[in-house]
Image: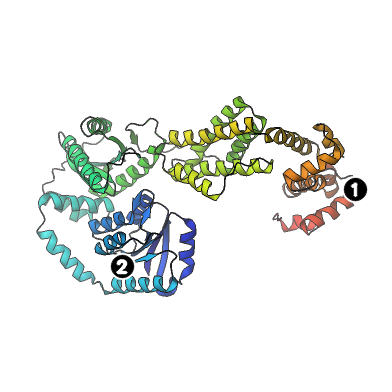
Amino acid sequence: MITALLADDEPIIIKGLKKLIPWEQHGIQVIGEAYTGRGLLELMEKAEPDLIITDISMPDGTGIDVLKEIGRRGLKTKVIFISAYQEFSYAKDALALGAVDYLVKPIEKGLLLSAVERAVAALEEESEGKRFKSKLAVYEHKDRKTRLEELFDRLLDGDIRKEEAEEELRTLEAGCVYESFTVLLLESELPAEDTRWGEHEKRLLLFAVGNMAEELLRRELAGIVLRKGDRLCAVVNHPPGLILTALAQDMIRSAASYLKVNLSVGIGQEQPGPEGIKASYRAATQVLTRIFFAGGGGGAVLYDREEGAETNGVSEREMTDARQETLQAFLARDPERMETGLGLLFERMERYAGGSKDKAVMAAYATVVEWAEGLAGFGVSLDQGEPEMQQHLNAMRSTRRYDGLKDYVRNVAEQIFRRMESGSSGKEAQQLVTVKAYIENHYMENITLEGAASKIFMNPYYFSSFFKKHTQMNFKQYLTEIRMKEAVRLLLQTDLMVYEIAERVGYNNSRQFSDMFKKHFGKLPQEYKAQGTPKG
């Protein structure tokens, strides 16, 4: 079956593509999705799909990068581009580099189906024998350097047998006399606001960094530096047990001094024999994903973590609790509490991410969403519609370090806090906090609207209107909602009898409680517990 990847920075577009045509009926299996250019390149490198359908312009890369990477690696992958921009230059470049088709959003089913069928036909027509013969003819004319690069590229991908690799290393006189191999993965960091760096300049930069790194490597050791996507991969042959931190630091210093660019290096695990190069490369790749969490703006060296070194994870519940703490600080207009809450939030967010930038970004975005929704529940509007929230997400994705992501979230928090301090809705919000806290702490008692109104020194009639305005429920409905949620928890998580639960949630009469429960959930308490899954 033909394998395919779908890529677009808008999840709704990917969802639509998956439903637009019957993929499996055409012998195609969608094996992955990507939302950034770099994410697509990484997924492509792992999966090596037969077909890619992607937006031509996404965060962290373009569709042209994908085509060039396919060409560089000699893959048979076919590409269909989609774009919201009907620009001839894009289409011209895409088709010139071998794209099957270029479709403009909104995608028409017939056009997509036709493009997919052409891609499938092209894949089926390609002869494995012809491609091999063509590669062999080209291979014979390559110089030693290029042949070495191809050999190590195959070792990194793990698509060459041990015996063949060892024979090639001897034939090409690679100088790899030691048993151990370690991969160093190099990533350059360009200022996001620097417009001088176009694609051509970036290629020249990688070439220069690669030459510099290889010169340092070969002063005392053997190996090679080659390009893998937007990164450089240094495969080092060295005596067993040699620590390569000093070499990595030399590379970082030289890149900063001579090329004026920050370089980060991920060091994989030492592996015995050329057949272990793939495992070391994978470890280095995983290590470099953690560079987002490295402090400071300069280069960094990261080693593969040893077993047991992972930090304890954080649950969704703990993340929600941290967000709620900062939300309560906004409502209380307490700056010290906000600072403490942000500190807890950032600490948990890093552990929750587990080394993944994408997970950290989505946790930060969920925080801003939850703040906006939580404040709206207290009648405080932040005017954060869909466009504003998308701007938040885009800005968070563009941060290069976790410190930058924290600064962005902190800035949002400070803007909210200033608005709460200066806004007229601050008093009402605090009143609502007081009333809700009273209800949540006393729902098991015989509390009344009049009693709740007295807590904020408000006339009961005015309080009734005030409460409904901010919660979209009257006082009795809200009280019942709180009682029913607690009743469900006790019903499913304890062995208490129904009459005991009724008493604990504020009902003196178990029959009245059961009637109210059935009205709320459609089932009597005993039936609900037998079902075992909460609904509503």
Residue lying furthest top in this view? 336
Q: Is residue 300 above or below residue 397?
A: above
Q: Residue at x 24, y 57 (%)?
A: 73
Q: Is residue 172 above or below residue 248?
A: below
Callout 2: SS: loop
Q: Residues within 10 Å of mark 1 (few under 14, many from 20)?
A: few
Q: Is residue 498 above or below residue 378?
A: below
> In the image, which disc is placed on residue 100?
2
> Which quarter of the image is occupied by the C terminus?
bottom right
Q: Position of residue 306 (x, y in %)?
A: 39, 37
| Nearer to the camera, 276 or 451 | 451
Q: Position of residue 366 (x, y in %)?
A: 55, 44
Q: Residue at x 52, y 49 (%)?
A: 387
| Nearer to the camera, 271 or 382 | 382
Q: Position of residue 471 (x, y in %)?
A: 73, 45
Q: Position of residue 144 (x, y in %)?
A: 10, 51
- First in sequence: mark 2 vs mark 1: 2
Say left or right for 244 vs 501.
Answer: left
Say left or right for 226 vs 44.
Answer: left
Q: Which residue is mark 1?
A: 509
Kindly indicate the quadrant of the structure image that contains residue 52: bottom left
Which amino acid, mark 2?
A: Val
| Nearer to the camera, 136 or 44 | 44
> Which quarter of the image is occupied by the N terminus?
bottom left
Say left or right for 31 vs 377.
Answer: left
Q: Are marks 2 and 1 in contact (CB under 8 Å)?
A: no
Frontmost of labels 2 and 1 is 2
Which amino acid, mark 1?
A: Asn
